[in-house]
Amino acid sequence: MPVLDLLFRKHREKTTLALLILLSLTLLALPKPAKIRFAQSTVNVVFSPAQRFVNYLQGLGGLRKENARLRRMVTSLMLERERLTQFRVERERLRRMAAFKEEQFLKLVPCEVIGRNLDRFQTILIVDKGSADSLRARMPVLSHQGYVGRVANVFEHSAWVQLISSRNSPVSCIDKRSRVVGVLEWRDHSYFELNNVSVVEDVQVGDTLITSGFGGVAPKGFPVAVVTKVIPDIDGLSLRVDAKSHIEFRSLEEVFVVTEEIPWQRAIMYDEQDSTVLRNTMGVQL
Amino acid sequence: MRIVHAIVTVFVFVLLQMLVSPKIAIGDIAPDFILLLVAYFAIQRKPQRAAVAGFVIGLGQDLFNPELLGLNALTKSLVGYGFGLVGSKAEQDHPLLLMALLGVAAVAHDFVYLLFFSGLHLGKFIILWTTVSIPSALYTALTGLVVYKIAATLGSKAVRTLGKARS
């Protein structure tokens, strides 16, 4: 075949490059579920053990120091929580008297980050808990600094978290001060844009944006970003609101997945059980 | 032996990317050790093999970001091919030229990458390219030169040790 001879003998290098480009573009054009299935199965087989080893090496240095610091912190938090529990009992009694709506508490599953995309822009985390630990797709993910993203895909012993610092992760947010609602979308670096805000609404630089709870994915009230700039948009009808997240998405090591909302009454039981366990393990006398 | 060498090299560069790159990053500006890995392979191999190596390395990187599966494979195979064409000549005598080539490769890589990553959103593309890609390309090129010097020093020491052992 003269054509094949021309392609694979005379222009072998160029043909190889063309085939690789074609293959890459085909992969890019695949539907998202197929891409995810392919990537997940490969990563779980090949990379997870290696990434666990790297994380172990990373954590080894500061482990003892961190452990001592955490023990101190847990002890002081235990004392603080015991006081708050007393306040809560009193508050519950008063709320019952005033017939307020029952509140919900969150059950958090702590997860260790065992993988992340190696790109310059952090969009995906892989955590060490999966369906065996009650994780499901679309569950919200938090860090101690606020809302981080949601569970995108779940395996038996691992899950993928889609961070809010990616193109397709808008979050419904509310201005903590003025209660103005908008949709927060990632722009670049740690910067976000709050969209759908009318020009007459009250948003100011320094305002904290928290999750609104609308849409049913992110629970209400978790900080997401702080407003850094407010100017009228070119259409004259809306505001251009820039905001910055204080979460270091690149260096997240532990996150919490919200697996359940616990009713007020059960939450007390849950916390009391938790307190007993901590009392026994930490030896704290309360 | 060559396969072992390749596996060790990949392992070292991936470790550098995972452990060192975040530590020496200045904000979002960080050296891209994976790109340096592709360049390293490209210097030693013909363009065709360098392109295949770039494709495999890029695909490995894409597995951690399946939404853009194929994008790093595309950009890294292009970088591998391009670097394989010109890099091997630069490496022999002109480390500064090698550094310049690394910078150009990093900028070109991010140009293609960001076109897809930004979803062809021109505003985002320009911001990310000017504020992240270009400074990161300089950082990558500088890091590449340092890595090259270290590798050259280690290489010559190994040659001397082997020479003494044989004599």
Image: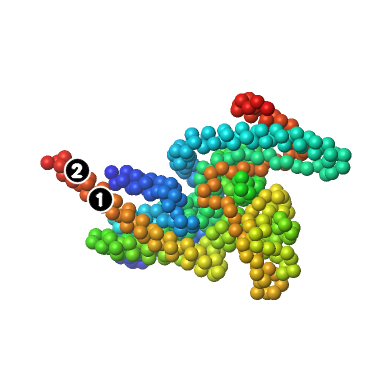
The residue closer to the viewer here, A196 or B48, is A196
The residue closer to the viewer here, A75 or B154, is A75
- Where residue B51 sits, quadrant-wise, is bottom left
Q: Secondary structure at mark 2?
A: helix
Q: How many marks?
A: 2
The residue closer to the viewer here, A262 or B60, is A262
Other residues around mark 1 within 10 Å, as few (<14) / some (14–19) / many (≥20): few
Q: Is residue A280 left or right of residue B18?
A: right
Circle 1 marks a residue in which chain? B
Q: Is any atom of residue A151 visible in this view?
A: no
Q: Position of residue A43 (x, y in %)?
A: 49, 45
Residue lying at the far left in this picture: please name it: B167
- Where residue A135 sits, quadrant-wise, is top right
Q: Position of residue B19 (x, y in %)?
A: 43, 47
> Which residue lies under the disc numbered 1?
B153
Q: Is any atom of residue B149 visible in this view?
A: yes
Other residues around mark 2 within 10 Å, as few (<14) / some (14–19) / many (≥20): few
Q: Is residue A243 left or right of residue A199?
A: left
Type of amino acid at the residue the image marks with label 1: Thr
What residue is at 54 percent from the left and 36 percent from the top? A69
Q: Secondary structure at mark 1?
A: helix
Circle 2 marks a residue in which chain? B
Q: Position of residue A217 (x, y in %)?
A: 69, 50
Q: CA distance from mark 2 to mark 1?
A: 12 Å
- Where residue B32 sits, quadrant-wise, is bottom left
What residue is at 32 percent from the left and 43 percent from the top? B4
> Which residue lies under the disc numbered 2?
B161
Type of amino acid at the residue the image marks with label 2: Thr
Circle nearer the N terminus (2, 1): 1
| B127 in relation to A86, above or below | below
What colour scheme has been applied to the protein in the rendered image? rainbow
Question: On the rendered image, what quadrant is the C terminus of chain A found in?
Answer: top right
